[in-house]
Amino acid sequence: MLAAVAEFERAMMLERQTEGVRIAKAQGKLKGWKPTAREKSGEVLKLLSDGLTKGAVAEKVGIGVASVYRIAKAMRESQK
């Protein structure tokens, strides 16, 4: 019996959450994340070609080091 009540309450919570997200999107409060690393890939490639380390590039541009590695890898693969 308790499991049935818990399942019902969970379904109600999910329904309320979905409704809240729908309302927030309609009001323009939820816009999702922006792929900032892709937008800054040109700047990243220039800084890497200038000789900066990947960590320094990440700090200067304001993205994660993993993103810098990903951009550098994509550049190497496109040159092949």
Image (tube, rainbow, N blue to C red):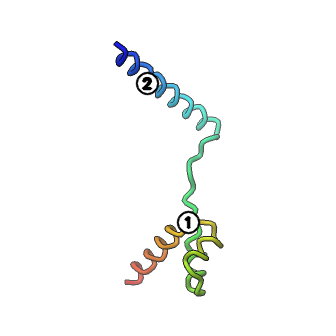
Viewer-proximal residue among 71 and 4: 4
Mark pair 1, 2: CA separation: 36 Å
* Residue at 41% in and 83% down: 79
Q: Are marks 1 and 2 in contact (CB under 8 Å)?
A: no
In the orientation shown, which residue stands out farthest toward the front?
2
Tag 1 secondary structure: loop
Tag 2 secondary structure: helix
Label disc, if present, on residue 15 of the rendered structure:
none
Q: Which residue is mark 2?
A: 10
In the orientation shown, which residue stands out farthest toward the top?
1
- Asked if residue 70 is positioned above or below residue 28 in the image, the reply reads below
Q: What percent of the width, then of the height, locates residue 33?
A: 56, 52
* Residue at 64% in and 40% down: 29
- Asked if residue 11 is positioned above or below residue 48 in the image, the reply reads above
Q: What percent of the width, then of the height, locates residue 21?
A: 55, 34
**Is residue 6 toward the left or the right of residue 30 in the image?**
left
Say which amino acid is labelled 1: Gly
* Residue at 48% in and 77% down: 72
**Is residue 47 toward the left or the right of residue 15 in the image?**
right
Q: What percent of the width, then of the height, locates residue 42?
A: 57, 75
- Asked if residue 59 is positioned above or below residue 47 in the image, the reply reads above
Q: Which residue is mark 1?
A: 64
Viewer-proximal residue among 72 and 79: 72
